[in-house]
Image: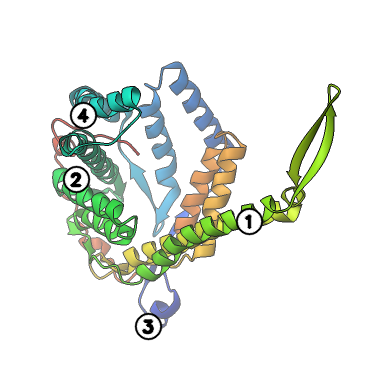
Amino acid sequence: MTFESSGAGSIGTAGERGIPAHRLEFDTTGKGWLIGMHISNVFLSVVTLMIYRFWAITNVRLALWPRMRFNGSPFEYTGTGIEIFIGFLKVFFLILLPYSFFAEWALDTVVVKWALFGTSSLNLIELVRLILGVYIPLICFYSIGSYLAFRYRVNRTQWRGIRGSVNGSPIRYAGKAIIAYTCTALSLGLAKPWADINLLGYKLQNASFGQRALGFRVSTNGLWKPYLTFWFSIPAYVIVTFALAYILDDNLITQTQHVNGNSISVKYSAKSQDPLVVILSMLLILVPFLLYMNYRARFWQNIASNTQFGAAKPVFNAEAPEFFKLVLVNYLITILSLGLLLPLTWLRKGEFMARHLVIVGELAEERLVQAEFDEQSTGEGLLGDFDIA
């Protein structure tokens, strides 16, 4: 791997005011080796019935973390496969297995009514059983696992010997998630910006690097307009799609074919075979996707503008077309290669982050002190380091 020392530079308005801008660099060389490691990880995971997956995750992180450099120094990953594996065993036997029996009890009435009577209507008691036995525990366990996975990755990340850390309560995060997901569902998705910013905000507000805490202000400013534009594009897309289908159906042509001596009338649409119609249908699908990428670009710009690290703060300058290109090309690489070229998407994401994220302001690196680290604090007792990423 090769890097040039970056140090602090200047960018935009910050540079004009003499404020230092600290840049990221990401090494995209060694693609062949990374693809070979990925194929080996997949093979070993399959032959070990996915047991090797936890070591495969570690291998990927050990390969990717040092590729990212900040002010010339690489990040380091210090996690191990056995840590993730032990955490998974705790969660599986002590949480997921009991939950499966509890969920089966809650679903029993619904399944029986559907199978025997062809109905899934619920009375109030059955609805409460379904919510308490399936919905809330599922959201709770997923959210706790997500928080612990985030905490594990941050706790196992170092830069110049200084480690990141995450405090906060996974249980409290799960409570916030239940409220956020419920509000999003009841509002038919309209509450998503509020839910997204509050959930990620709780993680960031409890994150530190060394002994310096990360500051974050929860705000949805600038998110509602792009999100509502995307939200309304979905019913618009459905209406246009049905209208197109109606137009095609209204232009059916009847053709008589002879099969085994019998005359059969076959209807087909001349327009449906027109390449222009096919291209138009594909473009229509891409419109809501592009609008959603615009929301994601504004979301991460919001996160950066409301984050503070001492006197420094991040600046994220990626726009919707760049997000669109990143996600679409990565999707095509993954699908067309049947997942074999997945490492190329990792490199593209790393290079994308390094190109668009800049830290502006004084870091005062000499005052960054390593926080005390209790090895046992990385787990949550019963749950352990539940890594679902």
Closest to the observer, 144 or 167: 144
- Which residue type carries mark 2? Ala
Mark 1 or mark 4: whose residue is earlier in sequence: 4
Task: Give residue 162's position: percent from left, percent from top.
Answer: 25, 50
Mark 3 or mark 2: whose residue is earlier in sequence: 3
Residue 244 tag number: 1
Q: Nearer the viewer, mark 2 or mark 4?
A: 4
Cα separation between marks 2 and 4: 21 Å
For image coordinates 60% across by 58% down, the residue present is 243
Cα separation between marks 3 and 2: 43 Å
Mark 1 or mark 2: whose residue is earlier in sequence: 2
Cα separation between marks 1 and 4: 43 Å
Up-down: is 177 above or below 235? Answer: above
Cα separation between marks 1 and 3: 55 Å
Helix, strand or loop at label 2? It is helix
Pointers 4 and 3 in contact (CB under 8 A)?
no
Badge 3 is on which residue?
17
User: Within 10 Å of the Cα at label 1, are there few (<14), some (14-19), or many (20+) other Cα atoms?
Assistant: some
Residue 174 tag number: 2
User: Within 10 Å of the Cα at label 3, are there few (<14), some (14-19), or many (20+) other Cα atoms?
Assistant: few
Badge 4 is on which residue?
106
Question: In terms of image quadrants, where is residue 246?
Answer: bottom right
